Structures are given as C-alpha cells and as structure tokens.
Amino acid sequence: MKKYDENVVLAIVLLLSMVLVAVDLLTTRDAHAEYGDVVINKYSEAAGMRPVVFPHWFHRVRFRCKVCHADLGFKFEAGGNEINMLKIIDGEYCGACHDGDLAWSVENCDLCHSGAPGTPTQVHESTLQKLVAPTGGKATE
Amino acid sequence: MIRIVSTTSTLAGSILLLAFVCLASTAVYAEWQTLKEDGLHDPLNPALQWLQNPGDALGRMPSDSAGNKVDWVRAFEDGYIRPRSSIHGEAEVKQLDTEIIMNDTGSLPRVMFPHKPHTRWLDCENCHEQIFKSKAGATPVTMSKILEGEYCGVCHGAVSFPLTECNRCHSVPLNGTAKSQ
C-alpha cells in the first residue's frame, strides 16, 4: 500500500537535509535570541518607539496557550492582531493582563518596547524565517 | 523533480545526515543568550536590567536539545510549572486522550499525533475546525505545507519544539508500535 513514489520521498528527504544543513551553517554565526520571541513592529518605530518584544517562554511558564490564543483572541500570526496602545489601555490584548493588577501596567513603556531599532515583525528562530531569510528575519510587514 | 537512484542506502544515508545536523545544531546552541547579547533587544535600553534572562528561568527545568532547550511536556507533567488555564486562576479544561496515526509518510516512520499533551496547553478551538478537521485522515497534511508554516507547522517551528526534530512526530516504526516516551 505504498502511496508515495520512493524517488519522490527520497528527494524530499534529501532536499530537507540540504536545506537544514545550509540553514544551520548560515545561522550559526548570527545572534541567537530565544526561540519563540515575537517582535511586533507594525506601528511602533513609525511612531518613534522601539519595536515590541513578546517573550513566549516567559509567558508560557505562567499561562497556557489557550488563555491568550482562545480566551483573549490572539491569532497565531506575528503581526496579525492590529494591536495599538488605545486597545491595550482599554484592556484588550496585552492590556488584559498588563493592568497594574495581574501584571505591571502600561506606564512601563521600555519593558515592552525593548527591541533593537530596525527589527521587523517576526517570530525569532521560526523554521520559516530560517528558510526564507537565513541571515535576517521573517518580515511579515 | 530531481531524480535520484532509489536505494535503501541513500535513504538511510540522508536520515543519518539529518540526525547529524540536528545533533550538530544542538551542540552549537547549548547555552541561552542574555537579552543584552541576543541581537533582538536594544542593548542601550536601560530597562533591560528589569527583564529576566531566559537562562535564569529555563535552566532549572527538564532540559531538551532543541527550541527553548526545555522539555515543556515534562516540565508541565512533573509540576515544574503550573501555567494558569484562565487569566484569573483555574477554569475547566477540555481534555482528550486519543492518539492519531498518520500513514502518508512514504518510507519514513509514521506520525503519531497525541491529543493529551496538546489539550493540556490548547483549547479544541485552537485547532478545530480551522487547522484540522475532527475526523482522522480528513485533513490533507503534507510535510511541505508543514514547513511552510501550515498544519503542525503553525506551532512547531515557531513556539513548540521545532521541525528539525523529525523523530518526535515520526515516532511509529513502519512495522511496529508507537515508541513509548
């Protein structure tokens, strides 16, 4: 019941290995931010603020994915959520927690707006980022 | 499509090569970077000192070879972390403990999708019916789509363990039963 042509599967496996080797060689020399860190920079720099860095590792220690991605409605897409400060102050998105009660409040601009200038919206170390732009980032904007 | 002479030894060879690549990459990235040096944060931001460095938190958890270098499944199971199920504490969580074997893997080991570790973190609606149909075999999943960030690749390759870890998904030998973890 073999559905795949052996040659096709082999080609895929070989191609994958070659891509991964190339990706590895290219990224070894780069800076290595934490896996899953999301940079959000649709509006920040244009408005004179540093890009936002959202650390998944820090938040998943405290909350299950469902809290943000089901209950609060964050879509699974870096830059895909039209977040701005009005909404945050209104208690949406980051503001659902960063309200000075559950977590420190919006006055702490530099804790969220902490990215290096010029960093585009991206998920750091995502496979896609490695495949598409091995030396830079996956710019969705 | 590239034509390659089909012999078992080239297949075994490429799988070995992949295994090597995965091992090599872990050797290079054995340590967590500090925020100051990670290339993502602005080192001139004075507030950086108030943020936690990943190594300070992740270094104390069950270790893994890829991604955050944390075995998140075990960290949760063994109580190293107790992530909340709602903003304000505990809410009822829908759980499911079934496994789905996916057979269209050519000559690679079959894929076993376990609901249990997923429903601990995620809600059914995070996957059904947008990413996956709730019917075994109904979703047209392929590896190239996954590598493009669809299906399993929505999370694996961005936040959950990365796609370099072939054997964690391809865990069921062609003529055998699921490897127990």
Image (cartoon, coloured by chain):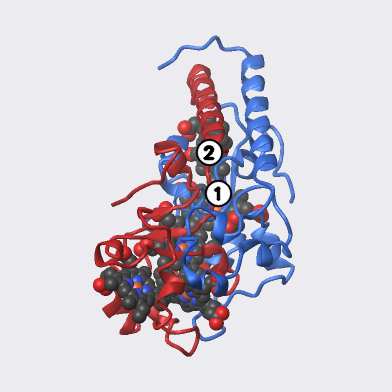
Chain colours: A red, B blue
Residue B166: % across, % down: 60, 39
Frontmost residue, A46 versus A4 = A46
Please name the residue shown 52% across and 64% down the image: A56
Q: Chain letter of disc 1?
A: A
Frontmost residue, A109 versus B164 = A109
- Secondary structure of residue under mark 2: helix
- Secondary structure of residue under mark 1: loop
**Camera sees residue A66:** no
Residue A103: % across, % down: 50, 83
Amino acid type at circle 2 is Thr
Q: Are marks 1 and 2 in contact (CB under 8 Å)?
A: yes
Identity of the residue furthest to the top in this view: B5
Q: Which residue is mark 2?
A: A27
Rendered position, B49 above or below B118 = below
Rendered position, B153 above or below B110 = below
Q: Quadrant of residue A83?
A: bottom left
Amino acid type at circle 1 is His
Q: Which residue is mark 1?
A: A32
